């Protein structure tokens, strides 16, 4: 979609009359299947016949997500701190000079939460007239233009993480953001993301899945792997009661984890509405979910010996040979 909008804008800059033939050519082209590419023939004065390649992501949830903008604005460590704050459903405020920066970064950090969904207030660009929302005691993720910063500092905002996307710094924080995630898994997250360019280039020379050769694909897989390691064994604790209903065994699920640091994380994370919504959805489904997360979980459980199925012992194991140097034990 972004490619199409960019092309339309480029043509409008030359002449509005050039938009129609492009859109007509686009509508006459077949809609690409997930992961496939189509070529759209166009014509621009002085350029002759031009071909634009449009590729649809394998996973539709990433079609409108721009991780590149997020990594341009923030360091890896800051991104992980924000990710941890959102997992614990805290209040987060993004501040930037441009609307598209606020929108892109807000949608990107929410995408990092997959397979979980943000259950609270989410306003990527909050109008200055509604700035009082940041005084709410409930969790939220909102974006504000820099022009609203003076007014923001005057408001009685309760505990919140305030992030300046233009300077890669926190204006306000809780000072415990580095301790919210299991330490070794956090270190593995940082290591993988710091070497993302190297991993993408390394994998592009191999025969592995093309989707992992992109920044969006790699970043998504890294965070999915974090959740596989922490909650990937959830399906082992979904049992049927006498009424035939699927019921989640909460205590058994948490106690089955060998790592003390992951157990401590789960004690807090399992109280979130994100986790409650995720489990409720799985309890109510008549058949097992088959999304990308469930596919990675199946691979993970198949790799573990029967005696270690509940151990969640290694990180990034399912990402292929390119990630072997990141294997970590808890």
Image (spheres, rainbow, N blue to C red):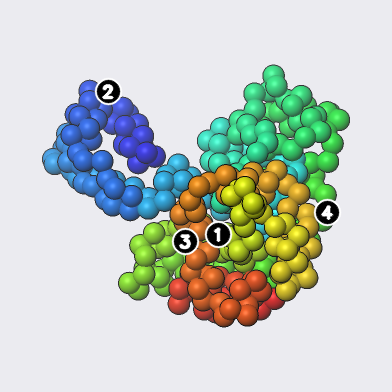
Q: Which residue is mark 4?
A: 175
Judge whether residue 225 can be spotted in this image. Answer: yes
Instruction: Point out residue 253 in the picture as x, y percentages from the top left corner.
Output: 70, 62
Q: Which residue is mark 3?
A: 295
Q: Residue at the far left: name it.
A: 48
Label whose residue precedes the other's in the sequence (3 or 2): 2
Which sits in the foreground, 286 or 13? 286
Q: What's the residue at 32%, 72% (across, down)?
A: 207
Q: Nearer the viewer, residue 191 or 168?
A: 191
| Label 3 element class | helix
Q: Are marks 1 and 2 in contact (CB under 8 Å)?
A: no
Residue 16's disc number: 2
User: Which residue is disc 1 drawn over?
Assistant: 224
Q: Secondary structure at mark 4?
A: loop
Contact? badges 4 and 1 (CB < 8 Å):
no
Q: Residue at (53%, 73%) from the top-left corner?
A: 317
Of callouts 4 and 3, which one flags the residue occurring earlier in the amino acid sequence? 4
């Amino acid at each position: 979609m972004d490619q199409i909008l960019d092309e339309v804008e480029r043509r409008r800059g030359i002449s509005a009359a050039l938009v129609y033939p492009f859109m007509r050519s686009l509508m006459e082209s077949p809609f690409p299947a997930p992961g496939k590419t189509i070529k759209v023939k166009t014509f621009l004065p002085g350029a002759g016949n031009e071909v634009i390649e449009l590729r649809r992501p394998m996973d539709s949830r990433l079609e409108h997500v721009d991780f590149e903008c997020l990594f341009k604005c923030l360091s890896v460590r800051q991104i992980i701190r924000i990710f941890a704050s959102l997992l614990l459903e805290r209040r987060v405020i993004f501040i930037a000079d441009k609307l598209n920066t606020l929108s892109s970064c807000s949608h990107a950090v929410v995408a990092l939460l997959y397979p979980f969904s943000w259950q609270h207030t989410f306003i990527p660009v909050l109008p200055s007239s509604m700035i009082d929302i940041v005084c709410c005691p409930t969790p939220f993720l909102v974006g504000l233009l820099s022009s609203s910063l003076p007014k923001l500092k005057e408001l009685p905002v309760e505990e919140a993480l305030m992030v300046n996307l233009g300077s890669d710094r926190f204006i306000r924080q809780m000072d415990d953001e580095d301790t919210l995630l299991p330490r070794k898994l956090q270190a593995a997250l940082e290591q993988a993301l710091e070497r993302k360019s190297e991993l993408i280039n390394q994998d592009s020379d191999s025969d592995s899945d093309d989707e992992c050769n992109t920044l969006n694909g790699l970043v998504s897989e890294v965070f999915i792997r974090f959740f596989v390691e922490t909650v990937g064994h959830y399906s082992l604790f979904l049992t049927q009661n006498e009424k035939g209903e699927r019921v989640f065994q909460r205590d058994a699920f948490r106690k089955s984890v060998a790592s003390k640091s992951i157990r401590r994380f789960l004690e807090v994370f399992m109280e979130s509405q994100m986790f409650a919504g995720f489990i409720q959805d799985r309890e109510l489904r008549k058949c097992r979910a088959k999304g990308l997360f469930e596919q990675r979980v199946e691979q993970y459980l198949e790799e573990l010996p029967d005696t270690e199925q509940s151990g969640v012992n290694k990180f990034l194991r399912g990402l292929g040979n390119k990630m072997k140097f990141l294997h970590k034990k808890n």
